[in-house]
Image (cartoon, rainbow, N blue to C red):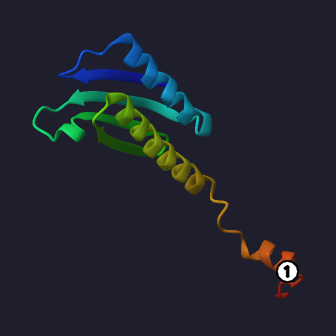
Amino acid sequence: MNLKISGHHLELTPALREFVITKLDRVLRHFDQVMDGNVVLSVDTHRDKDKRNKAEINLHLKGKDIFIESCDADMYAAIDLMVDKLDRQVIRHKDKIQGHAHEAAKYREEAHGLEAPSP
């Protein structure tokens, strides 16, 4: 996966970069068809003090783009919140792709002991 991490009004330290990478590995455990991602970490001085740090990600998956943003007083907490939201979205997308929710009518009838009408 190609991952671009950038900071806006923020010095991107190696510890912060490593924290983002290790957290995003959790997403790759569930779904490995991630093409690329763009993470933006920013500090907004015009917001409330409790939601000053913002973490955004734009993830390009096979067949879908996912955009998540989260705000918190602490940058590490904002990243955690972003990854939690992203994890739920990726799992939901994976379930939709696999399509195990609907069975074919033919298999449903056989499972219940009903025979399909002959033509």
Position of the C terminus by quadrant: bottom right
Mark 1, other Cα within 10 Å: few <14 / some 14–19 / many ≥20: few
**Residue 37 drawn at (x, y percent):** 40, 30
Residue shown at 22% from the left, 20% from the top: 10
Q: In this view, does 67 lie above or below 10?
A: below
Name the side, left or right, on which 80 lies relative to 72.
Answer: right
Q: Where is residue 59, by image quadrant?
A: top left
Between 60 and 53, the one nearer to me in the picture:
53
**Residue with the most extreme top position:** 14
Name the side, left or right, on which 99 lies relative to 114.
Answer: left
**Residue 58 drawn at (x, y percent):** 35, 37
Between 106 and 108, the one nearer to me in the picture:
108
**Residue 95 drawn at (x, y percent):** 59, 54
Q: Where is residue 57, by image quadrant?
A: top left
Name the side, left or right, on which 52 lies relative to 38.
Answer: left
Q: Circle 1 sits on which residue?
A: 112
**Residue 44 drawn at (x, y percent):** 16, 33
Residue shown at 43% from the left, 29% from the top: 36
Name the side, left or right, on which 97 lies relative to 8.
Answer: right
Secondary structure beneath dot 1 equals loop
Q: What residue type is labelled 1?
A: His
Residue shown at 63% from the left, 59% from the top: 99
Between 72 and 40, the one nearer to me in the picture:
72
Q: Is residue 110 above or below residue 82?
A: below
What number of labels is visible?
1
Residue shown at 26% from the left, 22% from the top: 7
